[in-house]
Structure formats: C-alpha cells, structure tokens
Amino acid sequence: MGASQTRTVHKYQDLADKTGFSLEQIKNLYQRFQHLSGNEETISRDNLESIPALANNPIRKQIIAAFFDKRNQHQDEVGSCNEIGFEQFLMVMSHFRPPNAKTTEEEKEAMRKEKLRFLFNMHDTNNDGTITLVEYRKVVEELLSNSGDIGQEAAKAIADAAMLEVASTNVPHMGPEDFYAGITFEHFEQILEGLEMESRMHIRFLDVNTATMRCGKSQS
C-alpha cells in the first residue's frame, strides 16, 4: 500500500470514528460529494440548489442552510459558512444515520437528542437558542403555502394559531403581561416526546438513502 493510499485510509478511519459511518459508506458519500462539487474541494449553496429532488421541497431553504450551519458540523461555534469541505459535509450527514440491531438504548437516546437538536437548529435561524414566533410562523407558513392547497392569508392565520397553541401548551401559567420569547430546546423536546425519530429522520435527496445505511465502524 502506497503512502498516499495509507494516508487516505487513516483519514477515512478518523472520519469513521467521528461520525459512526463505515469506511465503505464514507467512500460512497465522498463520491457523491465529488459529483456535487464538480470534483472541487468544497461545495456551496449553489451546488445544493441544483439538486432536482429538492426543487419542490417546502423546506428546501432550511435543508440547504442546515448544511452550512456550524452548529450542525460538531463545532463549538455558531454562524454559517459560505462553503463546506467533505468533513463538514459528512458531519452534517451523520445526523441522519439510523440505529442498527447492536445500538444500545443509551446510544439510541443520544441519537434522538442529536436529531432533535438538528431539527431545532434548522428552525432557530438566528442562533439565539429559541424558535421565535417569527421563525415558527415562517416555517409553518412556507410549508402550507408551498403545498398549493391553501392560500397565503389562510396559511398565515394557521401559522399564528399554531404558535399560540404551542405557547399555551408549554407555558400554561403565563400571565396576561408575560412575554413569550419562543420555544426553547427543552420545550421542543417536550413537543416531540413520543415521536420515533431514530429511524424516521433520513435523507434521500442526495441520491444516498440513509434509511438503508447501518451505523457502526468498519471492521476492515
């Protein structure tokens, strides 16, 4: 084995340790990354904008933004990047790994929390630790408006009502003068309590179906 190939294997093994993907899965994801980037070292939002399967997705903008959100790249930073390299891309993709038969209950709970945090970050667009009324309304409104089944004004009204319902559910003892800042991550966890996230949150729009991927490190 040549020195260059050895370095590549070591690099992939390091990424496998960080993400839980196998060496084979990392190789496949690298090929997809190269296709998206045009064999460049980084990809931009424009590269993801060109994916046909994303064209009609109602939360297309949020999905694309999530790849460039530093919070989703296992970094102790906030903010966004203009471009990301393969390691950052892989870190984001790791949020979509499903559990396997060997995954312990503790590991499943950690995966669930990680997926919930990813979803929370997608809606907390200003990085302030809460999903505000404006952010929540925008997401609900876009989901409804882009469905084509409901008008814009009706979508706005439903979005307003949905946020008020969330506020009343999570802060039942608020006084008339209290200000509801928004949904915290703890409230977000409560809202989605009981929803099976570990295997349902996967991704197909990159021509890589993470629902069929299996976690765990390569044995090679």
Image: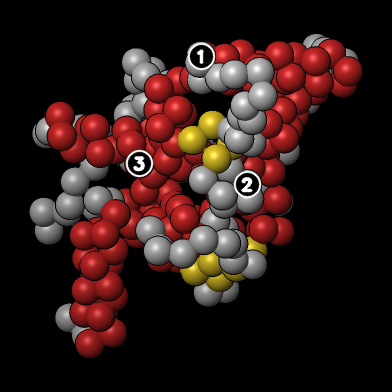
Residue mark closest to the camera, 3 vs 1: 1
| For residue 63, side relative to residue 146 (left or right) | left
Residue 126: mark in rendering: none
Of residues 38 and 58, the one nearer the viewer is 58
The residue at which mark 3 appears reads as 114
The residue at which mark 1 appears reads as 172
109 is higher (above) or lower (below) than 156: below
- Give percent across and percent down for residue 122: 56, 42
Q: Amino acid at mark 3?
A: Glu
User: Label 3's element?
Assistant: helix
Q: Residue at x 26, y 59 (%)?
A: 18
- Give percent across and percent down for residue 17: 21, 60
Q: Quadrant of residue 104?
A: top left
Residue mark closest to the camera, 3 vs 2: 2
Of residues 176 and 91, the one nearer the viewer is 176
Q: Residue at x 45, y 28 (%)?
A: 187
- Give percent across and percent down for residue 26: 33, 57
The residue at which mark 2 appears reads as 125
12 is higher (above) or lower (below) than 194: below
N-terminal label among 1 and 2:
2
The CA distance from mark 3 to mark 1 is: 27 Å
Quadrant in which the C terminus is drawn: bottom left
The CA distance from mark 3 to mark 2 is: 17 Å
Does the rendering let one see residue 143? no
Q: Residue at x 44, y 36 (%)?
A: 185
Cβ–Cβ under 8 Å for marks 1 and 2: no
